[in-house]
Image (spheres, rainbow, N blue to C red):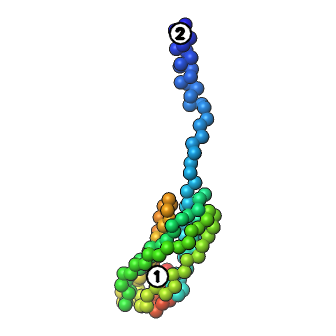
Amino acid sequence: MKKSIVGIVVLSFLLVPLLSTTAAIDPIPEITIVDLKGGIGLTVLIKNVGAANATRVGYHLVHGNGFFLRTTKWIKTLPDIPAGETITLRTGFMRFGIGLGIVTKIPWITLTIYAQDAENVTKTVSARTLGAFIILQ
């Protein structure tokens, strides 16, 4: 009797890993920067490739260097991005100045996109500026 109980217990411990268990995983948003273009300000395509809607979306933009340019920061909110959708962000006129990389270091722009429950996405680019016009490198 003791041997049969011990055998059943050992057999049950061996079979437990074979049982399929399903863990409930909550879908989360995943933000990516699809495209970044210059011009008058920046034009950015932002896509939510995750399985959930991205809420409380915003961006943090920092740029600096150049002649008449100093480090400047912007923080703004964006509309929610449904799962699988893409939105276009236009920053418009950023700051008047000259930054051609001849007299001073070439200007840089760092853009961070954030959303609730999603990892931040950051992209840094070098950019020549002439007035309000931005040419990405």
Q: Taking 109 as reference, is 37 left or right?
A: right
Q: Position of residue 63 (x, y in %)?
A: 41, 79
Q: Secondary structure at mark 1?
A: strand
Q: Residue at x 46, y 92 (%)?
A: 131
Q: Give the residue type that dot 2 points to.
A: Lys
Quarter occupied by residue 86: bottom right
Q: Callout 2: few (<14), some (14-19), or many (20+) C-alpha neighbours within 10 Å?
A: few
Residue receiving disc 1: 127
Residue 3 bears which disc, if any? 2
* Mark 1 vs 2, N-terminal side: 2
Q: Callout 1: few (<14), some (14-19), or many (20+) C-alpha neighbours within 10 Å?
A: many
Tell me whether the residue at label 1 lies in contact with that at label 2, contact meaning CB atoms closer than 8 angstroms.
Answer: no
Q: Taking 18 as reference, is 122 left or right?
A: left
Task: Tell me the distance, in whole angstroms, between the alpha carbons under discs 1 and 2.
Answer: 77 Å
Asked whether 45 or 53 is in front, the reply is 53
Quadrant location of the N terminus in the rendered image:
top right
Q: Residue at x 59, y 37 (%)?
A: 21
Q: Position of residue 75 (x, y in %)?
A: 44, 75
Quarter occupied by residue 67: bottom left
Q: Residue at x 44, y 73 (%)?
A: 60
Asked whether 15 or 36 is in front, the reply is 15
Q: Position of residue 16 (x, y in %)?
A: 56, 28
Q: Give the residue type that dot 1 points to.
A: Ala
Q: Is residue 35 visible?
A: no
Q: Relative to 126, is 13 above or below?
A: above
Q: Is residue 11 visible?
A: yes
Q: Secondary structure at mark 2?
A: helix
